[in-house]
Amino acid sequence: MMTASRGTDLTVGIDIGGTSVRACVVDPAGHMLDTLRTATPSTAGALEHCLDRLVGELRDRWAVRAVGLAIAGFLTPDRRTVRFAPHLPWLEADVAADMSERIGMPVFAEHDANAAAVAELHFGAAARGHNTLVLAIGTGIGAGLILGGEIYRGSFGVAPELGHLTVVPDGRPCGCGKRGCWERYCSGTALVDTAVEILASQEFGRSVLAAESDADPGSLTGRRVAAAAADGDPVAVAAYADLARWLGLGLGMIADVFDPDLIVLAGGVGAASGLFLDEARDHYAASVTGAGHRQLARIRGTQLGESAGVIGAAQVAREGLSASQ
């Protein structure tokens, strides 16, 4: 990464996911100057205390002007209230305003996938797209849609919630309350569930992942499956093949609705797209309506990796601060 500017126009971006919270000081060029990370607390009070603490630590070291929150949940159109968050403890919570009052600094909230889309649009892989879908694949699936260079939010601020499209009626239960959601088959969490199902269905005598799971079932995580797949472990490779199939089928449905010219895969799983992207492209090309007789979207991996959320949140804070002055 390029040497970062140490100017005064610095903001804090915080990516609040279902597994971890990451806070960064970011300059106007999208460079990260300082990073803190911790596990996501399970209660609202503990999570809010965690956010305040992270910002406090960063304020002690940097002259930051505002905070942006990338939140994995449904926000109101004005982005002041978190209505519901499948993987977080907030419900009808005025997260940004309450935090601003606690820390005495402007705080701006954004859907996490929209934050990633903002980052990719300004600093990354979406810079040359016109109608672009940014798909943040991590604990779940978030989606940010850029139409004509602007973030599309829908009439009530929640579009496009693609991760909770039902792809398997009465399928795996989802934290949103439904069953068979796309993210339950195409995410970091889904990787683990799929690996467990594969391990239960057949024997893998040469699988390190199988041996580790037998010795300690809790050792099976999305990151561990990714590392094992990179080493050619048959269980992990099979789990990624299943993820690639579901990703391709889902992208085919989305292309039928939005017809984007560019799809960017972000998030923790998206950052490992080298493990599944080619296979997912094949499934997408075969499943889209009019296959073989229409132009397909380019599919690219993120240029910002897992940092898209925090960089985008910091940019949202910077833009919000500018608009309020």
Image: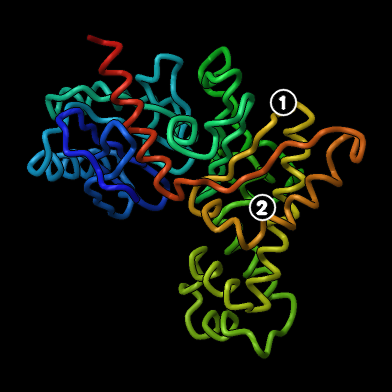
Using the rendered view, name the quadrant where residue 109 is placed.
top left
Mark 1 or 2, nearer chain start: 2
Q: Residue 46: give x, y in percent of width and height.
A: 24, 44
Residue visible at 30% across and 24% down in the picture = 108
Q: Residue 78: give x, y in percent of width and height.
A: 40, 14
Identify the residue at the far top of this view. Answer: 325
Against 80, is 7 above or below? below
Identify the residue at the far bottom of this view. Answer: 205
The colour scheme used to paint the residues is rainbow
State the residue position of label 2. Answer: 185
Residue visible at 29% across and 31% down in the picture = 28
Q: Which numbered tag is attached to residue 46?
A: none
Label 1 packing within 10 angstroms: few (<14), some (14-19), many (20+): few
State the residue position of label 1. Answer: 258
Residue visible at 60% across and 72% down in the picture = 229
Q: Residue 233: give x, y in percent of width and height.
A: 63, 79
Local SS, label 2: loop
Image-based side of 178 in relation to 315, left or right: right
Q: Residue 283: give x, y in percent of width and height.
A: 80, 51
